[in-house]
């Protein structure tokens, strides 16, 4: 298959920034990926940037200072992503396809109209709010930055109509691995060296895995606008790298770096202890799950603040039988999570794992960049 490349300059990038490039490369093996971004261009056969603001806050590539032949993918988050970013896969935008011209990146007025039937995703409870701020047990942490004026700006964007920011790269639909089979995901990434707010526990997801589709019963119970939480999420609330796993409506913290105050969680083998409900009726309340944890000798995560870390996840979700997620960092075993992972699914439809990486957070008036050196996905041997 031929190779199509379109290069577009987005204003005056700082010295050392590579031009934003779009590439249609030969297809990869189904559900496998080995992307080190050396080409300095996005492989549209693997990735869809539909939930990144390509007009005002696009991803870009920089030269790896340790290897002049390598490139690093950088995804910014700023006010341009306030209100979220809907994914438009149909005419006239085709946001998951390589644009033929720069003009195709401009979202039409028709496509920008609010979708009344859209699924509303909820970032859910944070695991640091009550501990850090002394909030009442089970109380939802209010975002102090989401003022009425900010909400007006979020609605004016005519995207997801929410007081959050989204800048996520997602796997193309035909690259999504089966959710109930063991697949290995390896991510080498770096976060900003400093996070301005380390006390309000603003919810900040930097990688997520979702089963798609989930059983229809959830829509029947909660309404068409309800959306499932990720069954696995890599998070950065308060600038703290941590990982959560979902047992239906019960979200459990399974791994974490120390908080900026120096405190670490007490990790012991057995039932997951740090769990909060994501059920619409009692969100934030303590909950019990089926999840069992088995930790390595040193299960405390290292921080990616200002430096690259390597995260490895061996992922299998499901509720019909015991499923498992194994987590490693920099080659070190952190924890094995087993039990009923994720949501019930339609028995007639084989669910896939929808994987996204980048920023998905409640609104903060601070600009940051996530740097990604490589992403690898393969079936466990």
Image (spheres, grey):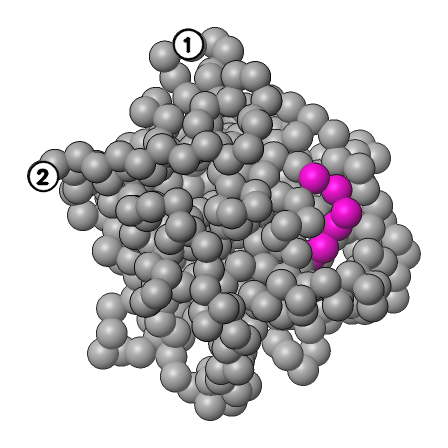
In this view of the protein, which residue sits in the foreground, 239 or 168? 168
Q: Is residue 1 above or below residue 85?
A: above
Q: Residue furthest right?
A: 134
- In the image, residue 90 above or below residue 76: below
Residue occupying the point 75% across, 68% down: 152
The residue under the point 33% across, 46% down is: 101
Q: Which residues are magenta?
A: 362-367
Percent coordinates x, y for residue 49 in the rendering: 41, 49
Where residue 269 appears, as percent x and y from the top left, is 57, 46
The answer to which image quadrant residue 161 occupies is bottom right
> Is residue 331 found left or right of 136 in the rendered image?
left
Does residue 197 show up?
A: yes
From this view, report whether residue 239 is shown above or below residue 161.
Answer: above
Q: Relative to residue 325, is residue 375 depicted above or below?
A: above
The image position of residue 219, as x and y in percent, is 47, 84
Residue on which disc 1 sits? 68
Residue pointed to by mark 2: 1
């Amino acid at each position: 298959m031929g190779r199509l490349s379109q290069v577009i300059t987005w204003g005056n990038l700082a010295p050392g920034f590579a031009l934003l490039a779009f590439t249609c490369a030969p297809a990869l093996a189904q559900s496998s990926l080995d992307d080190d971004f050396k080409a300095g261009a996005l492989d549209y056969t693997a990735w869809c940037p539909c939930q990144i603001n390509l007009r005002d806050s696009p991803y870009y590539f920089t030269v790896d200072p340790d290897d002049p032949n390598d490139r690093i993918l950088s995804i910014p988050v700023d006010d341009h992503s306030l209100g979220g970013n809907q994914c438009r896969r149909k005419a006239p935008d085709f946001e998951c396809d390589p644009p033929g011209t720069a003009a195709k990146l401009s979202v039409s007025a028709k496509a920008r109209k609010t979708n009344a039937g859209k699924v509303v995703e909820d970032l859910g409870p944070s695991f640091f709010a009550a501990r850090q701020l002394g909030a009442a047990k089970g109380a939802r942490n209010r975002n102090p930055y989401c003022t009425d004026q900010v909400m007006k700006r979020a609605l004016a964007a005519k995207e997801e109509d929410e007081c959050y920011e989204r800048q996520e790269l997602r796997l193309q639909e035909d690259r999504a691995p089966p959710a109930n089979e063991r697949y290995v995901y390896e991510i080498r990434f770096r976060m900003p060296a400093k996070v301005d707010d380390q006390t309000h526990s603003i919810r900040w997801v930097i990688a997520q895995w979702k089963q798609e589709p989930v059983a229809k019963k959830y829509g029947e119970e909660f309404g068409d606008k309800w959306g499932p939480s990720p069954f696995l999420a890599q998070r950065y609330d308060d600038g703290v790298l941590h990982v959560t796993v979902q047992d239906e409506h019960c979200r459990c913290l399974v791994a974490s770096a120390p908080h900026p105050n120096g405190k670490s969680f007490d990790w012991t083998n057995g039932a997951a202890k740090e769990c909060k409900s994501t059920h619409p009726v009692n969100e934030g309340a303590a909950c019990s799950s089926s999840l069992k944890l088995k930790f390595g000798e040193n299960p405390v995560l290292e921080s990616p603040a200002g430096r690259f870390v390597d995260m490895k996840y061996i992922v299998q979700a499901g509720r019909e039988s015991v499923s498992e997620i194994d987590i490693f960092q920099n080659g070190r075993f952190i924890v094995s999570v087993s039990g009923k992972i994720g949501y019930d699914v339609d028995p007639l439809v084989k669910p896939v794992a929808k994987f996204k990486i980048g920023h998905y957070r409640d609104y903060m008036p601070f600009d940051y960049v996530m740097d990604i050196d490589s992403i690898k996905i393969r079936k466990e041997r």
